[in-house]
Image (cartoon, rainbow, N blue to C red):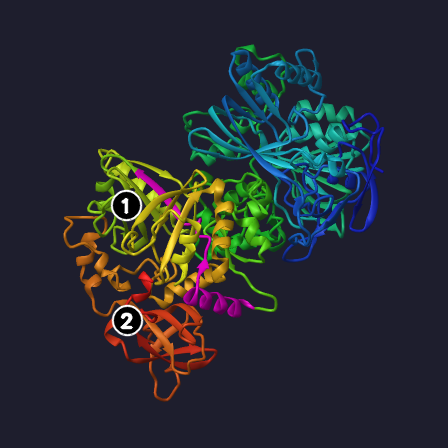
Amino acid sequence: MSRIKGYGRIDRTRTVGFTFDGVAYTGHPGDTLASALLAQGVHAVGTSVKFGRPRGIGAAWVEDPTGLVQIEEPFPEPMLLAATVELTDGLVARGLAGQGRLAEVADTARYDRKHTHCDTLVVGAGPAGLLAARSAARRGERVVLVDDRADAGGSLTGTEVIDGRPSREFVAEVVAELAAAPEVLHLQRTTAFGQYDDGFVLALERRTDHLGTAAPRNLSRQRVHRIRARHVVVATGAHERPVVFADNDRPGIMLASAARDYLHRYGVLAGREVVVFTTNDSAYAAALDLEHAGARVTVLDARPSAPEHWAALCRERSIAVRPGSAVVGTTGEVRITGVDTVTAGKAESLPCDLLLTSGGWNPAAHLFSHVRGALRYDPALGAFRPAEPVPGVSVIGAANGTFDLAGCLRDGAGDDAPATPAEPETAPLVLWRTEGDPARQFVDIQRDATVADIERAVGAGLRSVEHIKRYTTIGTAHDQGKTSGVIASGIVAELLGKPVEDTGTTTFRPPYTPVAFAALAGRERGKLFDPERITSLHSWHVAAGAVFEDVGQWKRARFYPAPHENMDAAVLRECAAVRGGVGILDGSTLGKIDVQGPDAAELLDRLYTNMMSTLKVGRVRYGVMCGNDGMVFDDGTVLRLAEDRFLVVTTTGGAARVLDWMEEWLQTEWPDLRVHLTSVTEQWSVFPVVGPRSRDVIAAAFPHLDVSNEAFPFMSWQDTEVDDVPVRIARISFSGELAFEVNVNSWYARAMWLRLLSAGARWNITPYGTETMHVLRAEKGYPIVGQDTDGTVSPHDLGLGWAVSKKKRDFVGKRSFTRPENTNPERKQLVSLLPADARTKLPEGSQVVEFRPDGALPPPPVPMLGHVTSSYHSAELGRPFALALVKGGQSRIGDTVHVPVDGALVPAEIGGIVLVDPEGARRDG
């Protein structure tokens, strides 16, 4: 065991059990998986993605490039860092070979989101961030403070002195003051992973991950906070930078700050025989702390001379300090056993079980970069730091390149900064790599990317670090180059013989750390992924055995199979019932837009291809909408309810799109028009009663209504009522049959549906679904926008030229009709296809090609005439038929073409689009 008494902030009075790679271990509440494994002497946790080399734990938090694990229990999740997984009782995990696998069981956890507004958002609860939040709170501002660790304080270990007392006591005092402030929201375990324009920040709160199976079921596991702040303070600290040398990827090689963090936060001494390789002063604190905890420590300082202050402290502790030394290689298998060093030209090998490296610090300025904040290279730090300020964003503390504690406190509190002892500092040495074999010098340890890979990229002519990143994959793993990115820039600069500031660095983009898709989806998962809309009759359809299909966001009954019926048999039965008797459809999903105002008619004239202003009150007109390019956008019917009021009926899937389109024109192009638009889709339920006996059913259901052709002509509507409930009935037909559409307030939908079924029982009224509706309309040549159109189809191509007004001066899309391409007789036009064998149902989407007497396709590329848009079996025709878009289709009626089906060419005859009742006699009964 490597637990050291007197160290750590974990709860050692309790023990939790966990399993890693099939072996049972124990840890304590407050541990991470990484600290618990290190406490058990486990350093190797997996293997690398490309070479299969052992990989261990390289850091204590999100900058770790190596310690990837797969969590199996209590929640299944791939590719998490052992250093960030908080230990829970019953945790089951395993190491990875560079990549994980998706969970094979459903994630039953809850996820949600929350919107928050504040004056000041502080990201990071280290010394600078805590004081910045306290200062803002004392000014009376609404403050949000987020920090990704389990507790506040950042890198403060407790050994520092602030205002004359241990730093942890000072942290607790500031946290208590923030907790007492009513306008402060303090969130630990919350990572700000993306900053966007106008003070918008996304942050992920891990609410119950640390509770494991004890997590309350009513709480979400993770929450995405959508924070809008007037001012954002970035106090995210810095990442320690390693130095590259041969075989620098072995387990047991770790950042110096990480070993110190494991000791003070978790009470874990990561090694007993420790070598510290540093280029700066910060690693000396780790060396002293580990020696105090019982390790034997040797410091290799790459600088020509060691800093006297730290060297003196080391001499007091019998810590050997070797200035002018560098690590050039390592030995060991599953864990490091020794280092190869060079001191003043002399090579030597040192035994060790832990190698700590520190090549300096990189400001964690990712959030600043997310809002296009520029970074400049600071040669004294060997790192990139924020340059010009971004409005509404402040970067303070180590994130801005201020690495001493006193400076961080001043950045956070200004003149009110608490006192802390001065820290002597010697200038660091900027060192990217030592001598050695480039093929064994790992720059991005997770990607197995080496200095040799960078040399290869430069040799191939690449000069941009962005290009080199993609060529080598450096910085594209889970850690997003937190430890490798700046090193890669430095090595590229060396190889090119140019300054690092000219090379630059890669662009930081959200997310700062990986975020689970489940958290981003929140509650929009499963049935809520794309909200399911159901009609007022949904439960009736379910009870009737309906098979549903998704149309837009609606669940629509597709067909109602009788026992032992498949879809084809059910649809043929339903079609025959409608054509021969009477059927009823739930058409409530059709989009319905209430258009009101003195200029309502003018608006519709400008949007539809045909005239709507001439429509009389009480009448209905079919209309087509086109986009700016003259292509069909949507179609439907328009009912004129009053001189200044219309009801626009759209396709089910196009309802929201049409309303948005109308609002866009009204608000941005024609704001002078006095019109208001309101969606009433859910307010009205609509039941088409269709077939030669539909008049009898409507007469029986509404005995006071005259439904004769003379009193109730086609394309008109009338209001009536039943038991004081208003009902609107329109004579509209999407099947070519006599039909009445019954509209009623959705609160009364079920009662009206049952009334119509009862009234039609004498004539065996048959509920039918959308598949039958599609067959009936296709037999009459009525197109469905989005199925028989693809964004390149004009009204003329569909045979709807009669719906394009020649009287109107202008409407949306009119000018496009005169474009030469839109008048080309070889445009694809809607036609019917009748397979010659009267048996083959042509698959929708099938290509249409010229007839080949030899029955064989020519060698590719095969010229295509068009494609099949709709295809059905027809009870009325006693055969299958299809609709298709075919080049010059109207001029080719009577021609035979071929359609490839399952490797064979099926002959089909081109015909007109109206296949049933071309005279239209059935429409009036």
Residue 887 location in percent, x, y? 28, 71
665 magenta-colored: no
Mark 2 or mark 1, whichever is nearer to me: 1
For residue 30, side relative to residue 736 (left or right):
right
The vertical placement of 83 against 387, above or below, is below
Do the residues bearing badges 2 and 1 touch, measured as CB atoms within 8 Å?
no
Is 735 displayed left or right of 436 in the figure? left
Farthest-out residue, bottom: 854
- In this view, the residue farthest toward the front is 704
The image's mark for residue 618 is: 1
Q: Position of residue 659 (x, y in %)?
A: 35, 43
Magenta span covers which residues? Answer: 566-595
Q: Which mark is residue 93?
A: none
Q: Residue 419: in sight, yes or no? A: yes
Q: Give the crowd class for mark 1: few <14, some 14-19, many >=20 residues within 10 Å.
A: some
The answer to whether residue 135 is above or below residue 31 is above
Asked if the stretch drawn in magenta spans residue 570, the answer is yes
Q: Secondary structure at mark 2?
A: strand
* Residue 767 shows in this picture: no
| Rendered position, 867 above or below 22 | below
Q: Nearer the viewer, residue 603 or 497?
A: 603
State which tag comes first along the sequence, 2 or 1: 1
Q: Foreground: 430 or 765?
A: 765
Q: Secondary structure at mark 1?
A: loop
Query: Where's residue 197, x and y in %?
Result: 42, 32
Specify the amino acid type for callout 1.
Answer: Gly
Check the picture and name the quadrant holding the C terminus.
Answer: bottom left
The percent position of residue 690, horizontal first and vertical second, equals 41, 59
Vertical side of 361 occupied by 899: above or below: below
Q: Which residue is mark 2?
A: 887
Q: CA distance from mark 2 to mark 1?
A: 40 Å
